[in-house]
Amino acid sequence: MDSWHTGYNSSNDKEKRINIHIPLHDLGECFTGDIPTFVKTDADRATEDALLDQWVKSLPEELSTDISALYKEMDEQKTKEAKVYKALDKLEKIEQEGQ
């Protein structure tokens, strides 16, 4: 796992965007399955978030801290990288609805 989370504290924006989007953005679906956005309920999201949080906390402390920081950044949407992630996620949702 170190190969995808190293560099979070790096100034390399491209690497940071990869750290945020690729491995993390759908990780919660490992626990609940891929529920299409237009079907997913608030209860589904809460379950996914709780299971993901439980898993992240079970990881070694340094890795858990790094991943938690990335999720916080994604949720707050204050950085350019987090906004790029959100835009890509929205595009994916639009594509899912069109299928």
Image: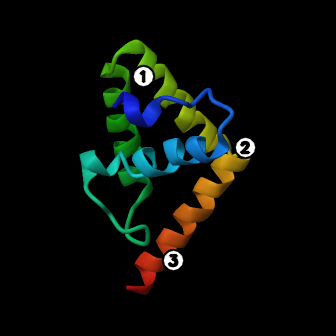
Q: Would you identify the image quadrant in which residue 87 lies?
A: bottom right
* Mark 3: amino acid: Ile
Nearer to the camera, 54 or 83:
83
Q: Would you identify the image quadrant in which residue 40 lies?
A: bottom left
Name of the residue lying farthest toward the top = 61
Residue 46 horizontal side relative to residue 69, left or right:
left
Q: Which residue is mark 2?
A: 79
Q: Is residue 30 above or below residue 63?
A: below
Residue 63 horizontal side relative to residue 31, left or right:
right
* Distance Cα–Cα, label 2 vs label 3: 23 Å
Secondary element type, mark 1: helix
Q: Name the residue rendered at 58%, 47% in the picture.
A: 17
* Distance Cα–Cα, label 2 vs label 1: 21 Å
Image marks 2 and 3: residues in contact by CB distance under 8 Å: no
Q: Earlier in the sequence, mark 3 or mark 1?
A: 1
* Mark 2: amino acid: Thr
x, y (%) of residue 73?
A: 62, 37
Q: Is residue 75 above or below residue 62?
A: below
**Quarter that holds the C terminus:** bottom left
Q: Which residue is mark 1?
A: 64
Residue 15 horizontal side relative to residue 55, left or right:
right
Residue 94: mark in rendering = 3
Mark in front: 2 vs 3: 2
Residue 46: mark in rendering = none
Secondary element type, mark 3: helix
x, y (%) of residue 61?
A: 41, 13
